[in-house]
Image (spheres, rainbow, N blue to C red):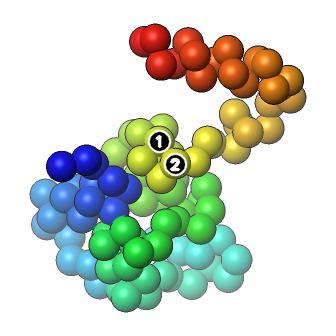
Amino acid sequence: MTMTFGTFVSKKRKELGISQKDLAGMILREEDGQPISPQYLNDIEKDRRQPTSDHMVEQIAKVLKADKDYLYFLAGVLPADIRSQAMTPEAVVERFKAFRKS
């Protein structure tokens, strides 16, 4: 089975003995500082939704004691520090080719 963002979050949460309700309460939305709902977390774990911001990915990584770069990878998102680099289309292609070779 392919590891997805949702399956990883679910697996790590269970390994750490954290309920969905408790984990949802620890993940705050960047917009208003309110916790996400347990239903929203359930949707993430079932791969019906993806995290809505870098802030959310990094909070989940911190609470689950996981590498944030791995979570960005699973979410299919590049971290902000990489997205903000000014790169030509050719440079992006070269980096992806190098990544695939490694």
Image quadrant in which you'd find residue 46:
bottom left
Label 1 residue SS: helix
- 93 lies left or right of 22: right
> On screen, 93 above or below 74?
above
Label 2 residue SS: loop
Residue at 62%, 42% in the rendered image: 79
- 98 lies left or right of 18: right
Q: How many marks?
A: 2
Residue at 13%, 57% in the rendered image: 15
- The x and y percentages for residue 20 are 27, 78
- The x and y percentages for residue 37 are 43, 87
Residue carrying label 2:
76
> On screen, 64 above or below 72?
below
Question: Could you tell me if the residues under marks 1 and 2 are in contact, i.e. CB atoms within 8 Å?
Answer: yes
Closer to us: 47 or 13: 47
Residue carrying label 1:
73
